[in-house]
Amino acid sequence: MSSSEFTNCSVTDIDVLRMSGATIVDVREYGEFAAGRLPGSRLVPLSQVADRSGEIDRSRSVLVVCRTGRRSAEASAILCRLGFEDVRNLAGGIEACRAAGIELEREVRAPWAIERQVRLVAGAIVVVGVLLSVFVAQPFIWLSAFVGSGLMYASITDSCAMGLVMARMPWNSDPNPGCATERVPASR
């Protein structure tokens, strides 16, 4: 095992790393990756980094990317513990790329972001609970109360059980790794 540590880098380093042949590893989930990523990046979700590390070329620099840099820092540490020598974490992640106007690519039919899906489902359950309590039986209001409590718990603990469930839905998994992509401006 390596005792090396990863290096944080900024968006200004991306072109130099690409030109030097670095492997770009995106550790977000498929839905996030499909919605906008650095061209040429490879999807290896954080939960799979250790198991799939054999797919990453150890002889090249590895640029690890996520939305803000938190998950990629965690993945970078894992890769260093597994013996990778030149691991770079993109500080600020894809959000920093968007802010810098760096061109991203995306899947033509990318799913909505998980947070957006959670808001839709939670809102729908609350509305259904209220309507059922008004038109069917008053105890259905507890359905809305349950969802509201769950959202409060998710906020306090910074976790989201509904988000974890939504991430495992079939429309949020990569149906075809070779599906069509398009380049989109970072502002989209």
Image (cartoon, helix red, strand yellow):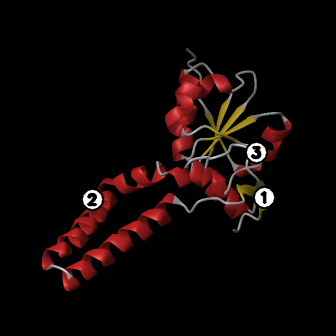
Identify residue for label 3.
13
Q: Residue at x 62, y 58 (%)?
A: 95
Q: What element does badge 3 sit on?
A: helix
In the rendered view, would you say 85 is above or below 33? above
- Residue 127 sits in which quadrant? bottom left
Q: CA distance from mark 1 to mark 2?
A: 38 Å
Badge number at residue 153: 2
Question: Extreme front residue here?
Answer: 136
Check if mark 1's residue and mark 2's residue have beta carbons within 8 Å: no
Give the side of residue 16 with respect to residue 106, left or right. right
Is 27 placed above or below 139 here?
Answer: above
Q: Which residue is mark 1?
A: 182
Local crowd size for mark 2, using a 10 Å CA cut-off: few (<14), some (14–19), many (≥20): some
Q: Nearer the viewer, residue 16 or 60?
A: 60
Residue type at tag 3? Asp
Marks 3,2: beta carbons within 8 A: no
x, y percent for residue 35 = 64, 58
Q: Position of residue 96 (x, y in %)?
A: 65, 57
